[in-house]
Image (cartoon, rainbow, N blue to C red):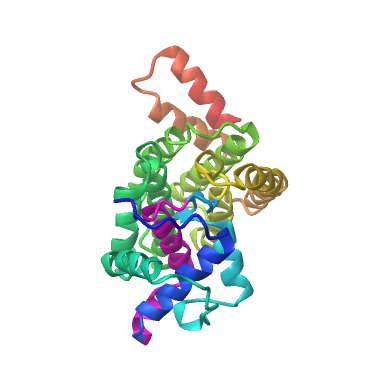
Amino acid sequence: MVSPVNFNTFPEEDFIKFALDSLLANIRDSTERKYLTKTRLVKFIVFIAEKLNYTNLTYGWYRHGFYSPLAEAILNKKHVNSLSDYVSSDVKSKPEERLAIDRIINDYKGIFMKPREQFYDWVYKNKCPKEYKPLYKNNIQTVEFINKVIDSIKKDSYESSINSKIENAITDYYNSLHHVKDEEILQAFCDFTDIFESMMLGLRNNKNRSKAAGYMGKLKEIQDRLYTYLTPYTDTLTGPKKEEEIKRFTEKSKSEVARIRKELQDLESDLRKENLWPSYEEMLSYTEELSKDLKPEELKKLERMMLS
């Protein structure tokens, strides 16, 4: 429901600070304030802006949902890690404005203080644009698989049956990147998946598993940075500074993705030196195993991919 109060008289920075002032005044319990971390505060601000039909805020869908670059910049400048750290800016407001924003906070603060899994379940399932829901689901699933592999190696309980599940997850992930038009970003993702699948094949063939755990951790760290540029951020940006933010983010992505690709190349080189990369024969054998039910042209494509 759109608020009858017009909040668009607020400049963007003032609105963000007014939203934070209102959250601080409304939520007084110290434990609840700590629950509202910087990340959740940014999301809450964007959500409040949407509910109040405030159009001067520049925001989009980023790594974990709603994101406003200015809201994060303000919180960073004030060294805010949670609402407990925030000091009111005392932005001038009218009684009807305070009443309208309090109504939104009261209706939704319970959701923003749910445990992490429940909170993000609400963000991704209920608020995420339909076309991007698979992306968020597949990223979470892939990260969970990486964590499972690392954990199983450390506990000496690795089972190769996980490999086929990971391959399916990677395929699903790739198929959810329809919004990514930049070829360098897509190639970086393919570089990541090539290494991930090759490491899994190496583990299956009893390569040095304890040594592989450290490299898998490095791969996870690189993937987390790459994920930033797989999100639909530039496609979903809205607000007065949309074009300015698209330009800034695009320029940043070019240099960072180039750096990521170089790190992935170095990682592959290290894996080969450490004898953690599957041999030609192992790859060929695995390719034949996967290709039992494939057509000849599909088999050739698979061989080129696996043996490149």
Residue furthest to the top in view is 296
Residue furthest to the bottom in view is 30
Rendered image quadrant of residue 261? top right
Residue 53 within the segment the image draws in magenta: yes
Query: Is 221 in front, or is 93?
Result: 93
Query: Is 278 in front, or is 34?
Result: 34
As drawn, 193 above or below 19? above
Q: Position of residue 2 (x, y in %)?
A: 33, 51
As drawn, 102 above or below 284? below
Query: Is 58 in front, or is 119?
Result: 58
The residue stretch that appears in magenta: 30-54
Q: Quadrant of the C terminus?
A: top right
Q: Main secondary structure of the magenta part?
A: helix
Q: Position of residue 46 (x, y in %)?
A: 45, 57
Query: Is 169 in front, or is 56?
Result: 56
**Does the rendering let one see residue 115?**
no
Q: Is residue 145 left or right of residue 277?
A: left
Rendered image quadrant of residue 109? bottom left
- Identify which residue is drawn at 48% across, 35% down: 177
